[in-house]
Amino acid sequence: MSTVAIPRGTDTKERLLRAAEGIFGRHGYAGTTLRAVTAEAEVNLASANYHFGSKEALVMEMLRQRVAPINEERLRLLDEAKRKAEFGPIPLEDILEALIMPLGGAARGQDGTDLSFLQLVGRSFSEPAEFMRRVHDTFFRELAEVFMGEIRRSCPQATEADLWWNLHFAINAMLGSLSQCRRVEAMSNGICEAADLDGMLNRLVAFLANGFQANTPPSRTV
């Protein structure tokens, strides 16, 4: 079983966070225990209780450290797009670019693709609904409202149901494309390179910008 490489000299709190990220990525929230984290971090259990108090607090802080910089960059890009649009409706492609492209930067490590981050992204598809609701409420609810406000202005003819369904599809396409980026290289026999994260995400933005504006098709009767 692989473990996270934690450099010597890393302080105790950071060791715990890095160990928690590795274990959570491999085993999910249910499989992450303070004992497993402290064993991998090579620190005692009392230190985990001292710094975080509970497993949930440790995991949520680990996620915050990963998510906060991405959300800050998303909002920065959205503000930049607002100014570019002279505070009128932002082109939908620019909104989606602000939402999606910061993930590319987060997924790049010093030595190439950050596999630990991709594992975290993949966890969004397999974690229990209640845990993901807490994650959404903590890190993404306000962000989603901000982006939806701009999407409404850019798609004034769409219904609320259309907009929220389409945003749901866009988010899942974004997360799935990133967490499974190596699949496309295998499917295409190397024509598409998994390491080209920015290229992949740029293509995804263009793809979603076209599909996002389509209205919900009428229900089919059997």
Image (cartoon, helix red, strand yellow):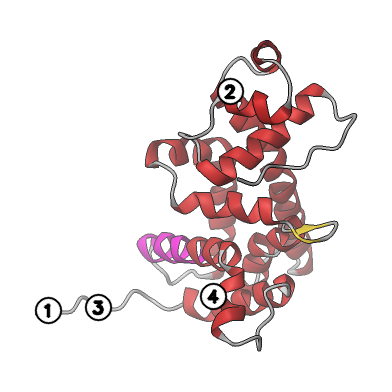
The overriding secondary structure of the stretch rendered in magenta is helix
Foreground: disc 2 or disc 3: 2
Give amino acid for label 1. Answer: Thr
Give amino acid for label 2. Answer: Leu
Mark 4–mark 3 contact, CB under 8 Å?
Answer: no
Q: Residue furthest front?
A: 1
Give amino acid for label 4. Answer: Leu
Q: Nearer the viewer, residue 170 or 37?
A: 37
Element class at badge 2? helix
| Mark closer to the chain start, 4 or 3 | 4
Q: CA distance from mark 4 to mark 3?
A: 20 Å
Task: Provide the residue span drawn in magenta.
Answer: 160-170
Q: CA distance from mark 1 to mark 2?
A: 53 Å
Q: CA distance from mark 2 to mark 4?
A: 40 Å
Q: Is residue 165 magenta?
A: yes
Q: CA distance from mark 2 to mark 3?
A: 50 Å
Mark 2–mark 4 contact, CB under 8 Å?
Answer: no
Q: Position of residue 143 (x, y in %)?
A: 60, 47
Give amino acid for label 3. Answer: Pro
Q: Which residue is mark 3?
A: 218
Q: Which residue is mark 2?
A: 34
Q: Is residue 98 magenta?
A: no
